[in-house]
Image (spheres, rainbow, N blue to C red):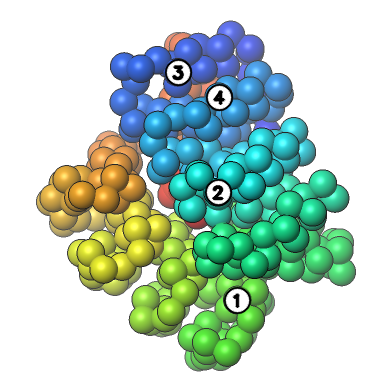
Amino acid sequence: MTAPPLIEVDEAVVIDLKQKLLDPSTTLPEKYRILFSLRNVKGAAAHNALELALKDESALFRHDVAFCLGQRQDAQAVEVLTSILHNADEHPMVRHEAGEALGAIGTEDCLVPLQEHLNDAVLEVAETCQLALQRIEWLRDHPDAANEESPYYSVDPTPALPTSTPTEELRAMLLDEKNRMFDRYSALFALRNKGGKDAVSALGAVFGACSALLKHEVAYVMGQMQDSQAVDFLTQVLKDSAEHAMVRHEAAEALGAIADSITVGLLRDFAKDPEPIVAHSCEVALDVLEFEQSGQLEYADKGPAGNDVGVEAPARRPICPCRG
């Protein structure tokens, strides 16, 4: 349940990326490319650049910055993430991501802020904090799992159940509204790791569930899987204006990650959606789609002269690269 190690780069590269990130003329897709580079870079300079990015005007971008701070599992980020979680005026999706990031970092300092929001007025924030605390508790009981690397290069909100678990059993666990969210998530990640038509079908059935948090995570993992069999499910979600914005935004980014040419027109249409989070997600997804179709391996800005500041890994989010 750990991400690949952060890498050392020349500080001049980080300074260049930071300047681009803060330049008012830098487009949102360009900011994402910079973000996914800084996410992988070790050291205070990269961390400070990410903290400054939390002041961006785009709630979508701020939430992905919080996501990346969690994926880095750097305890330096606990203070700023706690501040975001406590800020009731911040967008709920950003607060949710801050809570999830605290769970990913998992130090003692993360416990109190998460406990304080177990019954937050925003359901998605409350559910996120419950999951984050349960993740930390689970790792305490299973310390050897802390060093396991995800097949998708991500720090997941819960451990995955074994892929040897029958798909129908995982599907039943995932769809049962009476089950703990932690257990449903564990089934979700097992299905992601199994892959294939039946797994995608089971995941797609979740879009009829009650929890927006669970549905948004399903859309996220569909983007990680990059399986074209998920396109119909994701398209229906994106088109549903009554669906929660955090679910629709993940669906848009997942469609971009899958890189199916038939989705281009759909993403262009919804880049004009009245909900900014959805519109911005489509804008970024189109950029990811263009990147995927160009045959390039990494969705990232490598700084001056193409310095190597990334790792070869499947695209999330960006696929939130980019979660969530």
The residue that mark 1 highlights is 181
Amino acid on which the number 2 mark rests in the picture: Ala
Identity, as a three-letter code, of the amino acid under mark 1? Met
- Give the class, few, some or many, for how many residues have Cα within 10 Å of label 1's Cα (few <14, many ≥20): many
Q: Determine crowd level at label 3: few under 14, some 14-19, many 20+ residues with C-alpha closer than 10 A.
A: some
| Element marked by disc 4 | helix
Q: Is residue 146 left or right of residue 71?
A: right
- In 3D space, how far apart are the residues under numbered discs 4 and 3 (Cα atoms)? 8 Å
Q: Position of residue 2 (x, y in %)?
A: 70, 51
- N-terminal of the pair, mark 1 or mark 4, is 4
Check contact, mark 2 vs mark 1: CB within 8 A. Answer: no
Question: Judging from the image, what secondary structure is the residue with disc 2 in?
Answer: loop
Disc 3 to disc 1, C-alpha distance: 38 Å
Q: Quadrant of the N terminus?
A: bottom right
Q: Is residue 321 left or right of residue 85?
A: left
At x 41% / y 43%, what residue is drawn?
60
| Residue under pointer 2 | 88
Residue indicated by mark 4: 52
